[in-house]
Amino acid sequence: MNNTTNVILSAWHDYVQYSGAEKSKIPASKVHEYQQLFINEEHCRDEESGVYLTVPAEMARSWRRRFVRYDEKGHVSHIEPVSLLFPVLRCVDVEGSSTNTKYLPLFSFPLPKAFLISEDNTLLLPVKDGQQVSAFPFTFRNVFAVELAELGENRHMMSIISALTGQKYTGFFAAFEGLLAWISQQGQTPETAFNALVAPLHNDDFTTQRDGKDYEWLCDNPEGAFPLLEKYLTHEHSAEKPSIYFDLPTYGLFEQKYPLGHGQMQAIQAINQDERLIAVQGAPGTGKTTLFKSLIAQKVVERALAIADGQDRNCGMLVTSTAIKAVENIINDLRDDPVTQGLDWLWFQGGSNAQIKNEFSRLERLTGRWRQESYEPERQQALLASLNQHRQQINDCYQGYINHKALMLQSISDCGFSTTDMARVKAAFAARMADFFRKAASVPSLLVTQPNDLFSLDVAIELHKDAFIEAQRLRERAWQSAIRLESTWPLAHNWQAIVAWLDDPLRPTLEENYSDYPRQGVRNLLVRVLKGKYQSRSDKMRARYADSYQRMALTGLSHQQLAELADAGAKLSADRETVQLLKLLLTPEPDPEDLMTLEILEKEVSESTASQHRVETA
């Protein structure tokens, strides 16, 4: 995601987390004395499996009276799910001119049913089991700005407290007191009248956690992964290339503007799976009426299809509620909707005897009107043809989905993965990519500019291959130059000795002393006359550069040979390109296995990229 989109999604993520913490607060008005527990050191006995908490006998009896129900025969008929919530923060919320006290727990432990139906008042609290005694991550995040995930994986209560306070505790109560002290140091107010509550879990935060993970997953995606979402969130549309909008109503639903939400779709799917009874709960404005209207629309379409197939059946629904207004809202919406306002046969509103009598009177008038109408077979056939056409469109879409799914599964199978779960497939691709980069790290001087980017790795491999091939080409030229130089060099030196001669301290001195040596024409006649001068120079150089004379085997050479050596050295040193080629031969030769490794890695990266693309586009 780009920066702007990340800011927007992160803000929504924070809002979801804060709202989750808010919903977890327990109003003080709903907390009774029998629910309040004060844990002290006398109540605690540490064991390897956790801490044994001794609950006062009268309090334990109160819990059993309140949370356990018995039938007429004295058998347990119901046990209310309750949790031990501890420690507890006191929060004072100002709402208008009034203040409301609420409690916010940090940890929870569901009370075992066996404890509530037994006479044993000793409760085992497995404080070293993070699955049973769990923390409320949104409370730590939003109240204390602490990300529990950053403290380490699979933390339990004792290790969380140690990480927060920076101290190691040997017993539960010492850790509990340390946590209370840490809370006060953070500027928060722990409840002092009691430090634990037994109550139904006010908010298990399933929706908050699910939505929070969705936002985190979106933010972790790279820029360009969801271009339409980014355009929608940032309103970044091109004036030169305006988007083309299509008005595509959602068939089979009353709601035309927006699709159903996640929870609404779950209810629809439950009905499709022949669930006999569905409970719908939600605050005003959360879409309950919209859901019921959509369910009704689905049942109308279902019966129409059954009639078209000659298998008519009853698809009626009973909608009931403890609040009459909830049912009236659905019927009022049906009366007001342009699609159904004339279909007064679609519903029957129950209730009081007078209401039922009115409904029967309405139906009698309706059936009387129907008796006066005539059957129109042509119109029915036209409607049936339209219905079958739409059904075929839906079937084609479904078949397209099946084909795409089969293609995706085949693409995953072609990758050699043993799973079809997309989360695991992505993890497998990530592991494969990490393996590619490990192999790349073993190749010397392979420079990848962007880690964890296959395109960058592919470019680096291609560049490295080109450099390898170019190095081989230059070495071939260097060998040709070395062979040519050895054949034209005035003395019997190999190319290594010739290259060493270029840096020998004798070379510039030799060139200077023999720069005026007669080489051709009339001046050759002066060689005998000047022999003494050059002999004197040669003796001085031999005395001063004895090592060079010995290394290059110059002792006993004539002045003519020394002059030719001086000329050859001067000519070669001026030819920079040839000198560079010769010095290249002194460096280690590129390992052919590196090129083979690169070619294999390049092939694997290409195949993996193509496989991943097929899976993503399937």
Image (tube, helix red, strand yellow):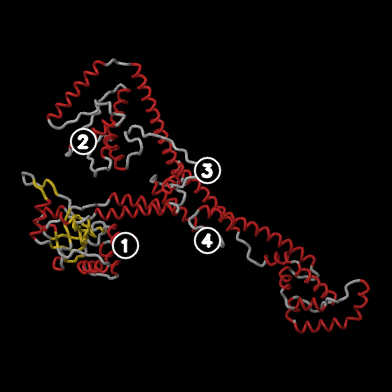
**Disc sitting over residue 145 in the figure:** 1
| Three-letter amino acid code of the residue under disc 2 | Val
Secondary structure at badge 1 equals: loop
Cβ atoms at labels 1 and 2 below 8 Å apart: no
Q: Nearer the viewer, mark 4 or mark 2?
A: 2
- Alpha carbons under labels 1 and 2: distance apart: 44 Å
User: Where in the figure is residue 259, as x and y percent of width and height?
Assistant: 35, 39
> What residue appears at the point 60 percent right and 60 percent down from the top-left corner?
591
Secondary structure at badge 4 equals: loop
> What residue appears at the point 76 percent right and 68 percent down from the top-left corner?
574
> What residue appears at the point 19 percent right and 30 percent down from the top-left corner?
349
Question: Which quadrant of the view contains residue 507?
Answer: bottom right
Secondary structure at badge 3 equals: loop
- Alpha carbons under labels 2 and 3: distance apart: 50 Å
Q: Which residue is mark 3?
A: 240
Q: Which residue is mark 2?
A: 327
Sequence order check, earlier mark of 2 and 3: 3
Give the camera-side residue of 528 and 184.
Answer: 184
- Alpha carbons under labels 4 and 1: distance apart: 42 Å
